[in-house]
Image (cartoon, rainbow, N blue to C red):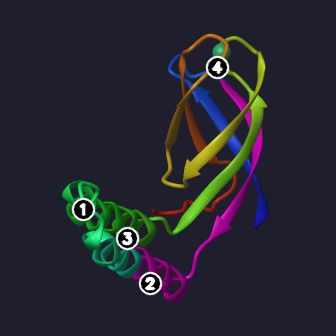
Amino acid sequence: MKELALVLQAETGAQTEGTATIEHFSTPLRWVRATIFLVGGVGLAAALIVVPILHLITTWALPLAGLIACVSVLRTRARLADIQGRCPGCEASFSHNGGRAVFPMRIDCPNCRRPISIAPAGEEHGQG
Ligand SMILES: [Zn+2]
């Protein structure tokens, strides 16, 4: 995890600066985590197949949830966390939990609900 300077832009073009921490996930780590989700979903479904009534849902829902988590982990190359900044629209300070680092990232201001476009301030433009 490292600190990343951000440019926050409102739809009016007004800009402010912000910061966040960015965590990059290596390709082998993403594949290992994806495999764990996929095998875990199928394995748990197989283990619960003997439980009456519950198996009506778990036999399809757990492998499906594992597959969705698997795809999500594979697509997440980097993650922004703890976004701090001032809304370019209403000037209110806010913090945001963040999410998958795909720029420009869009969030809504928690104060005025206007959309804020987030991009790295420097030359680093992540993808995925
Ligand atoms: Zn605002």
- The amino acid sitting under disc 3 is Cys
The residue located at (40%, 83%) in the rendering is: 35
Kindly indicate the quadrant of the structure image that contains residue 64. Answer: bottom left
The quarter in which the C terminus is drawn is bottom left
Q: Is mark 1 within 8 Å of ligand 1?
A: no
SS for tag 2? helix
SS for tag 3? helix
Mark 2 vs 3, N-terminal side: 2
Residue 119 colored in magenta in the image: no
Please name whichever residue, 68 or 108, is drawn nearer the observer in this view of the structure: 68
Mark 2 vs 4, N-terminal side: 2
Q: Is residue 26 left or right of residue 74?
A: right
Q: CA distance from mark 2 to mark 3?
A: 8 Å
Residue bounds of the magenta highlight: 15-37
The quadrant where ligand 1 appears is top right
Mark 3 vs 1, N-terminal side: 1
How would you rate the neighbour count of disc 1 (Cα within 10 Å): few for under 14, some for 14-19, many for 20 or more?
some
Q: Is mark 4 within 8 Å of ligand 1?
A: yes
Q: Work out whether 37 lies above or below 127.
A: below
In the rendered image, the residue lying farthest to the bottom is 28
Q: Work out whether 83 lies above or below 62.
A: above
